[in-house]
Image: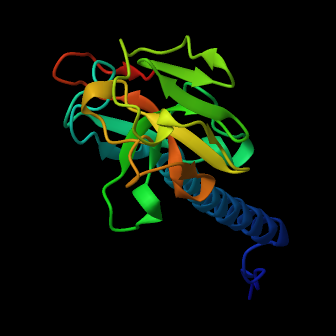
Amino acid sequence: MKFGRQKSGPSLSYINRERKVNINILYQILQCIFLAFIAVFLGVALVFAFGIRTSVVGESMEPTLSNGQEVLINKIAYQFSAPKQGDVIVFRPNGNENAHLSVKRVVATPGDSVLIKQGKVVINGAVYTKDKAEDTRDAGVASSEIVLGADEYFVLGDNRRNSEDSRSANIGNISRGMIEGKAWYHLKGRNSEAGRIE
């Protein structure tokens, strides 16, 4: 009677190979999950930083921006630097969380003096030459010289004849805490194609 060798279970090398395959699959799955998490995180961060939008109310920023035109807000621009003269900013008037966001141009920064005289905006004793507006007939509160505080900004609309801005006692100087971000890109408007805000 012949007795053959009984078949034993899988060989040791086969078990090791299977274990390596399982570890590789698990590693690839974890890698995919990690990359998906990073992609979602970056997507949310980019939308928060650059994709928040608001619409312009009224004609105060014409010809730069028109009524109803949507602008994208850079929320992180002023986390690393302060608003500069000429920037178009988005802010909440008087810090009111329920107020519609307002879009205006910064003409004076902390420590500057502001005076509007004979239709001209005068900053620190010199006429503001970066002005896009023809004249500023209504001087409002700036008919007497104003000196801005350590975190205050003086803002004006580009369409001075139809703008409620820092000249108005209702708005006044804008504090840093009221500023939501920089208006950096506008979508297609009534009289313009989409593009960066200058």
Return the x and y of residue 37 as percentages of the image width and height. 58, 60
Asked if 182 appears above or below 119 in the picture, the reply is: below
Tell me which corner region of the image, top left, top right, bottom left or bottom right, holds residue 100: bottom left
Asked if 125 appears above or below 29 in the picture, the reply is: above
Question: What residue appears at the point 54 percent right and 37 percent down from the top-left corner?
Answer: 144
Question: What residue appears at the point 27 percent right and 26 percent down from the top-left corner?
Answer: 161
Asked if 193 appears above or below 109 in the picture, the reply is: above
Return the x and y of residue 173 as percentages of the image width and height. 53, 48
Q: Which residue lies furthest to the bottom in this view?
A: 1
Asked if 118 appears above or below 27 in the picture, the reply is: above
Left or right of residue 120: residue 161: left
So how many labels did they put on this image? 0
Return the x and y of residue 164 as percentages of the image width and height. 32, 42
Say how the picture is coloured.
rainbow
Question: What residue appears at the point 35 percent right and 11 percent down from the top-left corner?
Answer: 134
Query: Can residue 64 be seen here?
Result: yes
Question: What residue appears at the point 59 percent right and 42 percent down from the top-left corner?
Answer: 153
Query: Can residue 40 be seen here?
Result: no
Foreground of the two, 198 or 188 = 198
Tell me which corner region of the image, top left, top right, bottom left or bottom right, holds residue 38: bottom right
Foreground of the two, 155 or 140 = 140
Left or right of residue 19: residue 31: left
Foreground of the two, 117 or 163 = 117
Left or right of residue 19: residue 123: left
Return the x and y of residue 165 as percentages of the image width and height. 39, 41
Q: In which quarter of the image is the N terminus?
A: bottom right
Foreground of the two, 27 or 103 = 103
